[in-house]
Image: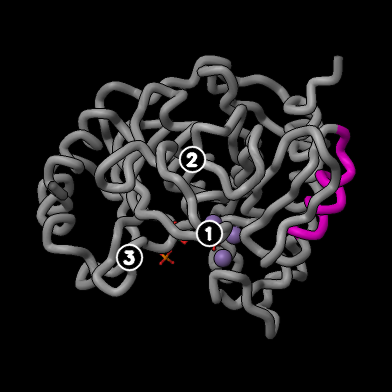
Amino acid sequence: MTDTVEDVVRVIARSATEIRRGLVGRRGKVDEENPSGETQAEADIWADELLADRLSTTDGVVQYASEERTDDLNCGDEGLAVAVDPLDGSSNLRSNNTMGTVFGIYDEPIPAPGTALVAAGYVLYGPITTMVYARDGQVTTYELSGGERTVVDEDVIVPDDPVVYGFGGRVPNWTDDFHQYANEIEDELKLRYGGSMIGDVNQVLSYGGIFAYPALEDSPNGKLRLQFEGNPIAYVMESAGGRSSDGTQSILEIEPTDLHGRVPLHVGNADLIDRLEAALE
Ligand code: AHG
Ligand code: MN
Ligand code: MN
Ligand code: MN
């Protein structure tokens, strides 16, 4: 019996080594926009095409969807759907800071609620290339080298005592309620914000705390995309004993309307998320 989930994760781990190597020389912007209206970097398009080729030809994968392409690829009848953010934090190409690749494996056609995820995770292109992968309530961290995965932690749990926070968007653009919550958190935790969701989420998973890209006055659904960023990260964080919220409920419960829909994203220690929801009531 093939394990399609395992096959998909193996393909992504092997592709990550090539994606990382291929960033060199592909840092510039191209004259193209993605479905979210963002100008694309050459590496955005390149990573997407590499993953599309590999994943759409993986047995058991019937749909490939990506933040970087308007339409999904249908590649079969019975099987799993894979959603990817091929290069998260690609604005960090200019400053050579952390980036990632995010993936969600759904057992329903995408767009789908996060409750349809059977596995999700991310690759972090840091000093070391690592993969964090959640499945069946377990979160595992691997180090990636030469396409091989080495387990370094097979029971990742968000640390109880929160240490760091990172909030996206410009302060004047935050809602008053979020601003008030941020003022409290700033007095309690240390600021860690690196401009890539994966880098910032991995800080929270490592030290405890909260990452948020909240609703903004001029963008009530925030910036991050539900299918490609919100659901996978919420799945990982909840699997690690943390919580996720769009401000009122777990992100995984949201019924999507649009493949490229955005969601206000808040993830981290459960009590910090509980306090956030109370502040936004
Ligand atoms: P992507 O590069 O996939 O478009 O993601 C960028 C996102 C996310 O990685 C990060 O949390 C956020 O954009 C940063 O936004 P700001 O540049 O507004 O801080
Ligand atoms: Mn982008
Ligand atoms: Mn992203
Ligand atoms: Mn991206």
Q: Is residue 158 above or below residue 178?
A: above
Residue denoted by label 2: 233
User: Which kind of residue does numbered mark 1 sit on?
Assistant: Asp
**Residue at 22% of width from left, 65% of height from top?**
174
Residue count near mark 2 (Cα–Cα under 10 Å), binned few <14, some 14–19, many ≥20: many
Q: From this viewpoint, is residue 127 visible?
A: no
Mark 1 CB within 8 Å of ligand 3: no
For the residues labelled 3 and 1, the Cα–Cα distance comes to 22 Å
Q: Which of the 4 image quadrants contains residue 16?
A: top right
Q: Are marks 2 and 3 in contact (CB under 8 Å)?
A: no
Mark 2 CB within 8 Å of ligand 3: no
User: Which kind of residue does numbered mark 3 sit on?
Assistant: Gly
| Foreground label between 2 and 3 | 2
Mark 3 CB within 8 Å of ligand 1: yes
User: Which kind of residue does numbered mark 2 sit on?
Assistant: Ile
| Foreground label between 2 and 1 | 1
Q: From this viewpoint, is residue 7 visible?
A: yes
Q: Which mark is residue 258?
A: 1
Residue count near mark 1 (Cα–Cα under 10 Å), binned few <14, some 14–19, many ≥20: few
Report x, y in % for residue 37.
55, 76
- Kind of element beneath mark 2: helix
Q: Quadrant of ligand 2?
A: bottom right
N-terminal of the pair, mark 2 or mark 3, is 3
Residue denoted by label 3: 169
Q: Does the magenta run of residues contain 58?
A: yes
* Magenta residue span: 47-59
Residue sticking out furthest to the bottom = 31
Report x, y in % for residue 161.
25, 25
- Kind of element beneath mark 3: loop
